[in-house]
Image (cartoon, grey):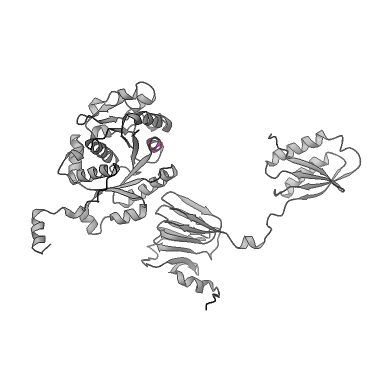
Amino acid sequence: MTGKTIITIKGVKEGLVFLLDDQCDFVELLDELSAKLDKHVQQFNGPIVHIFIKLGARQLNEEDKERIKSIFRKQGNLLIQSIESDSPEVDPDAKEVPQLHTMIGMVRSGQTVEYDGHMLLIGDVNPGGTIRCSGDVYVLGALRGSVHAGTQGNEEAIIAASLMRPTQLRIADVISRPPDEWTSAEPWMEYAFLREGKMAIDKLTSLGRQRKEVMLFKGV
Amino acid sequence: MGEAIVVTSGKGGVGKTTTSANLGTALAMLGQKVCMVDTDIGLRNLDVVMGLENRIVYDLIDVAEGRCRVNQALIKDKRFDELYMLPAAQTKDKNDISPEQVRQIIESLKPDFDYIIIDCPAGIEQGFRNAIAGASQAIVVTTPENAAVRDADRVIGLLEKSNFPSPKLVINRIRPGLVRSGDMLEVDDICQVLAIDLIGIVPDDESVIKAAHSGEPTVMNVNSRAAIAYRNIARRILGETVPLAHLDEKSGMFSKVKKFLGMG
């Protein structure tokens, strides 16, 4: 399709290494693979050759791996030794600590911002605007719209804002409607969190106590 | 080369057409060559407000579809030599013209005029996209009501997405008495939410209704407070620094006397 080779074959001492492109479409890759094997059918006749397949960043399930194997099986003398992908998560801690994404600007009516991780918005969320995040949401500005934190069920997520005047707040599966359920007219920064499954509001300075994080700032 | 300004709001009935008619006329009064373009196809009003309905021969769709040249469709105002308008079609709808066609028509008007005021229909669909296509500057009209401010915010978001660097805000139909008693949004609160430059505040004024009834733009009325507000907006468009008028000056002789006696 493109001029680029999506399959590279390298000879090594133990046999042949097939380097498969990890960006192209999987079906396209399978077609190219059958074509390549058919073309070189002469070379692949003879003694048993060990095959090592490297998928790059592509992740495959067993079914798809089987589809690759079946293509090789058509050539009698090719014996697949391994099908490998590059390990995706190098750092297992990376998944546990979500990224903090900083965004500058206003979320106006009709606009939605979604992010997988924590989010810091420098600007206002206007009525009709929405932020949805799998982690915490911090608004350095006026929160007048709606925010859903912990979208994937994280009940520990919090929503903090310089000025807390939301139309609706959600944390995990809990929905709260100010001012019917609670009101805030405080001039200081506040945050919303779940206390025994119910939405609660407190001043931001209480967050450290709630999370029981040990503060170890060294002073003079 | 002229500057094309679209007057928009999202919500209907907040005074887009009135604002377009009055800004167009006010700019013409200040010696500018102005063309007003009505893009509210199917529900044209600008010609009625301007009292020019009976002069329409060709319209915007006729120009777009090549049935006439743009100069043939322009209607010269009966009061000002330098004021023209291009009416919308009444028998078609918004989908009968494309943003690209509108843009070309506006471009063809630019060399002949100082200002092109585009009156946008309500809504954020095709009609809105048509109206903003040729413009390089936008004026968002809102009234001090939550619904209108919400829609204005939505429109500002869409304008910012369409590369309008800094839309300007007009707050229309302010009733100082209601604001004072806390029953109407305050100008400062609206500006805080919308966070764009305020270019004018217009008080609610009966003379606007009377003017629309007679087909004379309000700005022609020397005594109207709304007229002064519109003239001030026009001067601000021209780059003058005009302070915002105090809206609660509306005190009759009796209250002035009361104030003088320390009873006010």
- Does B23 appear in magenta? no
Residue B97 sits in which quadrant? top left
Disc count in the image?
0
For residue B29, above or below residue A99: above
Picture quarter with the N terminus of chain A: top right
On the rendered structure, is A116 left or right of A10? left
Q: Looking at this rendering, what residue extends furthest in the top direction? A: B67
Answer yes or no: is residue B141 visible: yes
Q: x%, y% of residue A16? A: 83, 45
Q: Which secondary structure is most common in the magenta stretch?
A: helix
Q: What residue sits 20% from the left and 45% below the top?
A: B228
On the rendered structure, is A158 left or right of B60? right
For residue B18, above or below residue A138: above
- Residue nearest the viewer, comparing B53 with A174: B53
Q: x%, y% of residue B95? A: 41, 31
On the rendered structure, is B216 left or right of A15? left
Answer yes or no: is residue B13 visible: no
Span colored in magenta: B128-133
Q: What residue sits 77% from the left and 43% below the top?
A: A68
Q: x%, y% of residue A148? A: 49, 58
On the rendered structure, is B238 left or right of A69? left
- Residue nearest the viewer, comparing A180 with A192: A192
- Residue nearest the viewer, comparing A49 with B75: B75
